[in-house]
Amino acid sequence: MNYQNIIAEKRGKVGWIALNRPKALNALCHDLIQELNQAINQFEDDTSIHVLVLTGSEKAFAAGADIREMKDRDYMDVYKADFITKGWQRVASCRKPVIAAVAGYALGGGCEIAMMCDIILAADTAKFGQPEINLGTIPGSGGTQRLTKIIGKSKAMEMCLSGRIMDAAEAEKCGLVSRVIAAADLLQETMKLAEKIAAMSLPVAMMVKESVNRSYETTLAEGLLFERRLFHSTFALQDQKEGMNAFVEKRPPQFKNI
Ligand code: DAK
């Protein structure tokens, strides 16, 4: 896979994607988003890939959408073209688990893409923020929505209204990230987690993801029903028989992803 703005590679069962526009702190330009879409599509289609990792550099996960690309567009132009919409939700629509490994800046669209991932692991250098208000605009890819659902109204309001940037410790405290890891260990720890999830039955991992995400979209009663139906459906899998038999036989399971 040969890209200009990202690096994508298979690492066993893990599809590893690193945003790679170092001179612009991985600002999310049109071409980068297109390449990110292509890489995700490829990993989704590849049955040997179970988990995706999305990361950036030591200095920046991504410092937001590319301000240079946006600054001269006018209203009719962005409205008619549905500006920076196509492809921007691809991370959120990925059916396989996606882990974000964030070091340095995750601002604006960078924070929004991290929040589209299923798990965020943060280096102790990570900084999160929705500073769009400083540019005279508002978050455009879920910042006012996902951030509010994750960290609550008061903190989300404060961040979006003031543009304040949050450090990794605060992000962990308010549930934005699942763990903070020493920067030097971030990628290794991320790979360990990715490999652990990748060793599970892929269809079951996909069902877990679908079910957890459902809790954001529906009532508790509907969510519980959805979970119950998926739970029942796992009994149609060979992997459920293998997992439960392996437990009883006191041996590790050998999942076949069927
Ligand atoms: N866009 C373009 N270039 C950027 C950039 C960005 N977002 N962020 C940084 N750069 C570039 C800088 O211009 C600089 O380039 P040169 O001048 O060297 O050519 C280079 O990266 C290094 O940046 P700095 O010199 O500024 O580095 P510092 O360490 O001093 O500061 C910083 C780092 C991250 C604090 C600073 O660069 C900064 O404040 N960056 C802008 C952060 C920001 O405002 N981000 C939000 C952008 S708006 C939507 C989807 C998404 C969005 C909207 C709609 N739809 C789906 C509808 C998202 C919008 C945004 O993200």
Image: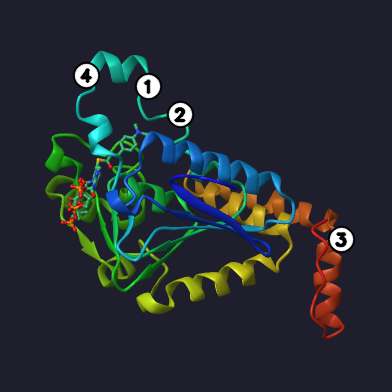
Q: Disc 2 on helix, strand or loop?
A: loop
Q: Of residues 144 and 190, which is closer to you in this image?
A: 190
Colouring method of the image: rainbow
Cα–Cα gap, marks 2 and 4: 18 Å
Cα–Cα gap, marks 4 and 1: 12 Å
Q: Are marks 2 and 4 in contact (CB under 8 Å)?
A: no
Q: What residue type is disc 4 on? A: Asp
Q: Are marks 2 and 1 in contact (CB under 8 Å)?
A: yes
> x%, y% of residue 130?
24, 48
Q: Which residue is mark 2?
A: 86
Q: Are marks 3 and 4 in contact (CB under 8 Å)?
A: no
> x%, y% of residue 200?
70, 66
Q: Nearer the viewer, mark 1 or mark 3?
A: 1
Q: Is residue 220 above or below residue 205?
A: above
Q: Is residue 119 left or right of residue 60?
A: right
Q: Disc 4 on helix, strand or loop?
A: loop
Residue appearing at x 80%, y 75% in the figure: 253
Cα–Cα gap, marks 3 and 4: 55 Å
N-terminal-most mark, 2 or 4: 4
Cα–Cα gap, marks 1 and 3: 44 Å
Q: Is residue 112 above or below residue 241?
A: above
Q: Which residue is mark 1?
A: 82
Q: Are marks 4 and 1 in contact (CB under 8 Å)?
A: no
